[in-house]
């Protein structure tokens, strides 16, 4: 029965109106590389809680994109929709042009994911942890040992690979989780609060390893954080998320320049206002609701205590 339906009709099945329109556009130039991630009016609710509430977003191939916002903004939920871990209707999400609702496995093969919760097993060695992910992500048996060694080396854990993960520091655990996500050679690396609970040196080290892999492979990075400093330092573009939506989007410099302009227009400048920070931008666009609902960024406490949980 379904075999009788022409492909064009089946592809345009209910709810895929935007997809059809995009496909029908005339193409007289070679198609550009699709964006690494697109979200169109992405929405996800847990009962009455609208965790993600109309999210529009494009992450370009090759960039480091930061999704910023306080606890409860909806960052993790959005990430879980993009990584196929939460089901969303067709047309809301694209990963390099693949729709998680239709091509779940294809999407999973494109990405590496470091979740917010601990994903390494304390009772296994570093090498065993990474091997496990290599098996789960279908790295061929022939290539496995070499790819595991390569991933461990890429995060500076070659020498510690034979030790149990429970002997690792918090920073080493985070790098081990990074190796787990990198072992499948993903085109898109998604990191959910990668440096939460880490000291500044461990945090810098994690980013150095991420950037070294990017330089070698051109991998795209989508990272969530509530650290404005971190976003400012490492992200090409950032989106400020609050209560399930994006409130501002641009390069950190653009966002700061826009706030400076708004302050000037409203006559606030010249009263000795310091150069705006990304946090100032967020407060400006999210408004008072930020303080009422979440207590703002200064009150955010680490929800993740890697070292203590493993040790
Ligand atoms: N599994 C769940 N069940 C019920 N509510 C959830 C669940 N996960 C998240 N939420 C709620 O959804 C909202 C967004 O949460 P989350 O996506 O984790 O935000 P963030 O990652 O930005 O801190 C919050 O109000 C949170 O309480
Ligand atoms: Mg989260």
Image: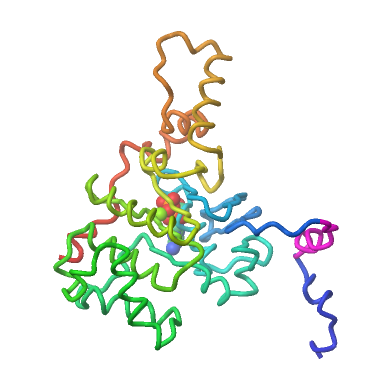
**Where is the C terminus found, in terms of image quarters?**
bottom left
Q: Residue 111: horizontal and vertical position, in percent?
A: 49, 67
**Residue 276 figure quarter:** top left
Q: Residue 10: horizontal and vertical position, in percent?
A: 79, 77
Tell me the residue at 43%/33% (across/down).
278
Q: What secondary structure do most residues of the magenta stretch adopt?
A: helix
Tell me the residue at 23%/57% (across/down).
171
Find the magenta span and give its range: 16-28
Could you say which is closer to the camera, residue 133 or residue 267? 133
Q: Residue 188: horizontal and vertical position, in percent?
A: 50, 62
Q: Is residue 280 magenta?
A: no
Q: Is residue 244 above or below residue 44?
A: above
Could you say which is closer to the camera, residue 241 or residue 157? 157
**Where is the N terminus found, in terms of image quarters?**
bottom right
Q: Is residue 167 above or below residue 142?
A: above
Q: Is residue 291 above or below residue 48?
A: above
* Residue 205 relative to residue 182: left or right: left
Tell me the residue at 77%/69% (across/down).
14
* Residue 103 relative to residue 257: left or right: right
Q: Residue 242: horizontal and vertical position, in percent?
A: 50, 42
Tell me the residue at 55%/26% (across/down).
258
Q: Is residue 25 magenta?
A: yes
- Looking at the image, what colour scheme do you see? rainbow
**Residue with the most extreme front position:** 216
Q: Is residue 10 above or below residue 196?
A: below
Q: Quadrant of ligand 1?
A: bottom left
* Residue 219 relative to residue 176: left or right: right
Could you say which is closer to the camera, residue 308 or residue 162? 162
């Amino acid at each position: 029965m379904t075999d009788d339906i022409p492909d064009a009709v089946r592809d345009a099945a209910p709810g895929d109106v935007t997809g059809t329109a995009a496909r029908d556009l005339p193409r007289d130039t070679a198609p550009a590389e699709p964006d690494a991630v697109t979200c169109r009016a992405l929405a996800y609710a847990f009962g009455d809680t609208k965790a993600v509430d109309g999210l529009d977003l494009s992450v370009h191939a090759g960039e480091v994109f930061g999704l910023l916002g306080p606890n409860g903004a909806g960052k993790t939920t959005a990430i879980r929709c993009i990584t196929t871990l939460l089901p969303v209707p067709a047309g809301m999400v694209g990963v390099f042009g693949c729709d998680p609702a239709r091509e779940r496995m294809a999407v999973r093969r494109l990405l590496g994911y470091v979740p917010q919760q601990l994903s390494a097993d304390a009772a296994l060695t570093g090498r065993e942890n990474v091997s496990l992910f290599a098996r789960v992500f279908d790295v061929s048996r022939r290539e496995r040992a070499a790819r595991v060694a390569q991933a461990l080396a890429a995060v500076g854990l070659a020498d510690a690979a034979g030790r149990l993960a429970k002997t690792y520091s918090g920073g080493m655990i985070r790098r081990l989780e990074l190796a787990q996500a990198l072992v499948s050679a993903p085109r898109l690396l998604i990191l959910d609060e990668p440096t939460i609970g880490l000291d500044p040196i461990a945090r810098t080290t994690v980013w150095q390893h991420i950037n070294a892999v990017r330089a070698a492979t051109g991998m795209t990075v989508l990272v969530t954080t509530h650290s404005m400093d971190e976003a400012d330092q490492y992200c090409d573009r950032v989106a400020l998320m609050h209560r399930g939506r994006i409130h501002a989007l641009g390069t950190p410099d653009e966002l700061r320049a826009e706030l400076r302009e708004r302050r000037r227009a409203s006559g606030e400048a010249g009263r000795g206002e310091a150069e705006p920070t990304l946090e100032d931008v967020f407060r400006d666009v999210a408004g008072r609701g930020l303080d009422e609902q979440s207590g703002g960024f200064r009150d955010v406490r680490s929800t993740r205590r890697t070292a203590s949980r493993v040790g």
